[in-house]
Image: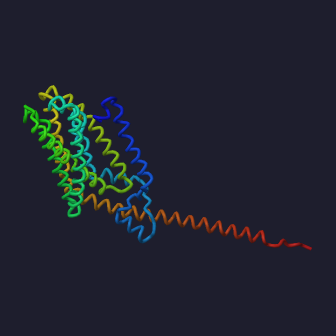
Amino acid sequence: ATVVGAGDWRWPFVVISVPMLLLGAMLFLTTEDPQRGGAEQSIQSLRQHTGMDYFPQMSTRHIKTVFANRTNALVILQAFPGCVPWGVIIVYLHDYLVQDIGLTRQESLAAVGILGTGALVGVFIGGCVGEWLYAYDSRFLTAFCSAATVFRVVPFCFIFGWTGLDPAGSLASHTSFMVVLFLGGVVSTMPSPGIGAMLLNVNLPETRGTVFAFYSILDDLSKGFGTLFVSMIVPYVGGRAAAYRLALIIWVFCGFALAPTWFTLPLDEAAMRTHLNDAAMESVVRVSKRQAAQQVTQRCKAAGDAFAKERDNRKPVRWV
């Protein structure tokens, strides 16, 4: 963006869209839409023993399971406030780096890129660690997500309080600041894969899309609300750096909100598997009825065709 947008700010959007279009076309041409719930054990068993696929059908019972799920409630409870700090980071970090830290625009954009690289690394590390913990005990995944959500406050408190740590702004300080930015990116995204996995594992295949859509909407609303919230409290807390640090405290409450999932996740997973087994049997019944109706229709049609053929071939009787 710094190099391409030097002449016209619109060019970076054009340049960035080209590889995205190519990747989208490649994805469309080389991948297939996976079967819904195809990785679930009960659905694999259904296909193995009956040769039938899982055909989910939404009903009021499925909607009730979504709202009765305590893990859903806890994760979604922390979703809205949990992205308030993200709204602050996304909107205000670049300006903070230029105005308060004293970086040039090019250095500020590079710093944001370092933060984004750390965030990418954090997603990968969080996914690997979460998968390892979940394989040992699903409750350890909840503890990891809760602790990481609280701990990610620490590096960003240093980032938004850096002017107080080094007022001179030396070169060594800038180097250390970039390291803290990278570590902040790593730590900040580590809980995300685990939180997504928890939602995935406690919801039926046919309701997962709805739950994730609602979760994403709350995330986006929270980011927008976060920028408004911080801009309103700046005059009352002694400056925008203090307001940014105050917004980070919300992550602490989100971490504590995730803590009870230690108890709810195993129970909700077991309930989901029970509902999934019932849904798989309902799918077998629906498919069996459909196949039986098709067979009855085909046999009736064949019998009607045979009768018509026999009638046409019968010689007419002449009366004397």
Q: Could you tell me which quadrant the C terminus lies in?
A: bottom right
- Residue 233: x and y in percent read 17, 29
In depth, the one of 164 and 50 nearer the eye is 164
Residue at screen point 38% across, 40% down = 17
Residue 261 shows in the view: yes
| Residue at the outermost right position | 320
- Residue 99: x and y in percent read 17, 28
- Residue 181: x and y in percent read 17, 42
- Residue 267: x and y in percent read 25, 59
Residue 96 shows in the view: no
Whether residue 215 is situated above or below residue 226 in the rendered picture? below
In depth, the one of 5 and 201 nearer the eye is 5
Whether residue 25 is situated above or below residue 109 in the rendered picture? below
Q: Could you tell me which quadrant the N terminus lies in?
A: top left
User: Does residue 11 appear to the left or right of 149 in the view shown?
Assistant: right
Residue at screen point 33% across, 52% down = 66
Residue at screen point 26% across, 34% down = 225
| Residue at the outermost top position | 235
Residue at screen point 36% across, 38% down = 15
User: Does residue 104 appear to the left or right of 199 in the view shown?
Assistant: left
Q: Quadrant of residue 173?
A: top left
In depth, the one of 301 and 68 nearer the eye is 301
* Count of marks overlaid on the render: 0
